[in-house]
Amino acid sequence: MEARAITIAILAMGGEGGGVLADWIADLAEHGGYLAQVTSVPGVAQRTGSTIYYVELFPEAVARSAGQDPVLALMPVPGQLDVVIASELMEAGRAVQRGFVTPDRTTLIASTHRVYSMTERTALGDGRVDATVLLEGARAAAKHLVHADFDAMARNSDSVISAVLFGALAATQALPFARQQFEEAIRRGGVGVDASAAAFATAFESAAGDKIAGATNTQTGPPERSNRLQEQ
């Protein structure tokens, strides 16, 4: 079977440490025998800006045996994502709307807390998108869904959500690395190590103990996409 890149998209808002999370994943991979590439596409339209961080990992041994470096993409391609990480529930909805999450391939890790979009905030009436609808859409779209209020988990750990999401990622076993390797990446980062490690452990242990809700999707057809999500 021909080797291919592992593809990961992180959808995060400003100040949530999305770049740190992407760097941890790249460091984890590079110390685990993979080549890594990280790119980002910043945005300013929603809630002081949201950014898509995109990471591709490729087995270094395969590249070396072929005698050339792999050609890695600079942006996520709909239908081609192995892992999608969303730091807020509407961001998970956006990932579904864009086709990043597919039932044949994607592990979706999503925080269920809400930071309301400008469209929701400026509506004359109650413009909030139903969180249940967002979560049901995420469940229908993903091969495997892991969801919890990761923001609350981070605050309870006196840390930031990126460390919690890193712990949830490790617990899914969606990447070919052990828990210890994830923790070593945090330590190599050298900033806020103790708090980040504690937050990581909280999320990992919660996921391992089935305290984080999960779902596996067996459908083969594409999920229906909400028009209301598109309007947001």
Image (cartoon, rainbow, N blue to C red):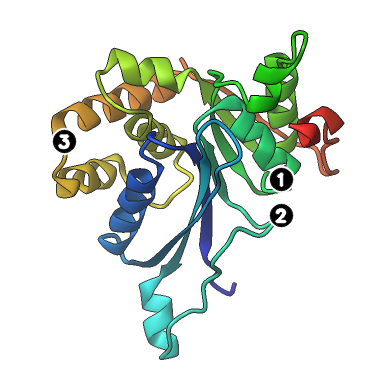
State the image coordinates of residue 78 (x, y, percent, origin top left): 70, 55
Residue plotted at (42% across, 80% down)? 63
Q: CA distance from mark 1 to mark 2?
A: 6 Å
Residue placed at 59% from the left, 26% from the top?
A: 89
Task: Looking at the picture, tell me which residue is in the foreground, 219 or 185.
Answer: 185
Q: Position of residue 25 (x, y in %)?
A: 36, 51
Under mark 3, the amino acid is: Val
Where does the C terminus fall, quadrant-wise? Answer: top right
First-in-chain label (2 vs 3):
2
Which circle, 2 or 3, is nearer the viewer? 3
- Mark 2: which amino acid? Gly
Q: Quadrant of the N terminus?
A: bottom right
- Specify whether residue 10 is in view: no
Look at the numbered discs 2 and 3 and tell me whether their residues touch, using CB distance below 8 Å.
Answer: no
Q: Are marks 1 and 2 in contact (CB under 8 Å)?
A: yes
Query: Who comes first in sequence, dot 1 or dot 2?
Result: 2
Q: Which residue is mark 1?
A: 102
Q: Residue farthest to the bottom? A: 67
